[in-house]
Image: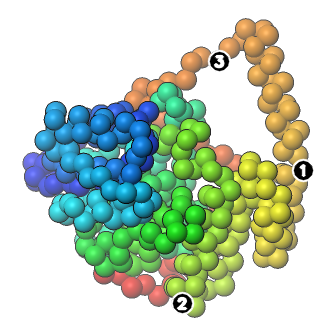
Amino acid sequence: MGEDHNLDNIRVAVVIPAYNAELYISETLKSVAEQTHQNLEIMIVDDGSTDSTPTICRAFTASDGRVKVISTSNHGVAAARNRGIKETSAEYIAFLDADDIWHPTYIDRQLSALHELPPEWGAVYALYRLIDAHGRCFGSGPAVHARGYIFARHLAFKFVGNGSGLMVRRRVIEKIGGYDPSYAAQNLEGCEDFDLEIRIARHFNVEVVPLGLVGYRIHAGSMSSNRERMAKAAIEVTRRCIARTGPLPDIVVRNALLSAHVYAIFNFLEARKLVPLLKSLAAILGCDALLGSAILFILIRRPIGKAKRALKRLWKYTTRDAEPPAKRFLDIPLDAPLYDAPSVFRTPRRMVLLEKADHEFPQTLH
């Protein structure tokens, strides 16, 4: 990567919103600074942090002239990203959360994939691996992906998966607008990236680099750790999309709602919120009785599965049959497979039906 001098001359803006990210922001910025594509604008928007995040970030500006820091009062991640977009000028914009990391070839591979395509291709995404607070991999996002006009499929399958795996052309943002800050006002932060992706996918083709180039960090302080809020946000994003897009085919609406409520159920379960969980289950049963029955069966068996896993861990501990230590993100080969967990929702049949819907849906590509 990085051998194409035409691409070397293309500047890419990296927008990083940061709020009380002192534990991880150094590793995040290091992963950006060490990109094989070096022609970068690195814009950090400190969203009213009360810890040492601003101090750490400003220390990077002294050692790397590409890094700039803007401090604002706390308005939420969407407003911070929008401010970062406004303060940059590059033709391409990549977004990175302040606790995630990139593979060194992330920008190179994303830019190479998108730049060679015609203007109706507005964005490119990469797949991801899950990392813990110490940067060790403990899983991955799904390997399933799609390219082209993926509006209906992305509504259902959420291919991007997190806010750190997307690169867009600036003119795409100019056409559809930036991130929607109104979710923060309703205490529904967490899915603004999905909202943006849906609006992009409605008007533009989307490319994919099917490699685990993003280290998506899961930890107690992350935004995604608020399971109840994430569940409600996913439902609200889907509801708004259906309302603003106009008459959608029934299969698209039904599967979008099913997807949102399936995601919500397991988040409500982790948050121990029984009433909204039952409402989501009722919504699924109303759309697809077979899927709802399968979800109910999984919920009933879940405690048994947890107990079995706990006994297995205990057995390994007592017999000293320990698993090998987890590898760090950068130690995993790029061609190592991503984990395709079984899913009662993400079935081949549903993928085929929604792909057909994408082919038949009236496109407004620009």
Label 1 near label 2: C-beta < 8 Å?
no
- Residue 45, given in percent of the width and then of the height, sits at 31, 53
- The residue wearing badge 1 is 300
Mark 2: which amino acid?
Answer: Gly
Task: Specify which label sits upstream in the sequence, 1 or 3.
Answer: 1
- Tell me the number on the disc at residue 246: 2
Give the alpha-carbon distance from disc 1 to disc 3, as whole Å.
Answer: 29 Å
Label 2 near label 3: C-beta < 8 Å?
no
Give the alpha-carbon distance from disc 2 to disc 1, as whole Å.
Answer: 38 Å
- Residue 97, given in percent of the width and then of the height, sits at 41, 48
When asked about the image quadrant of residue 250, the answer is bottom right
Mark 3: which amino acid?
Answer: Glu
Check the image and report above or below for 182 versus 142: below
Taking the view exactly as shown, the residue that stands out farthest to the bottom is 247
Answer few, some or many: residues within 10 Å of disc 2's Cα (few below 14, many 20 plus, some between 14 and 19).
few
Q: Is residue 129 left or right of residue 301?
A: left
When asked about the image quadrant of residue 230, the answer is bottom right
Q: Is residue 36 left or right of residue 260?
A: left
Check the image and report above or below for 225 versus 168: above
- The residue wearing badge 3 is 323
Image quarter of the C terminus: bottom left
Residue 72 seen anywhere in this rendered image of the structure: yes
Residue at 58%, 64% (x, y): give it: 188
The chosen color scheme is rainbow
Residue at 30%, 72% (x, y): give it: 172
Check the image and report above or below for 172 versus 98: below
Mark 1: which amino acid?
Answer: Ile
In this view of the protein, which residue sits in the foreground, 148 or 35? 35
Answer few, some or many: residues within 10 Å of disc 1's Cα (few below 14, many 20 plus, some between 14 and 19).
few
Q: Secondary structure at mark 1?
A: helix
- Residue 341, given in percent of the width and then of the height, sits at 66, 46
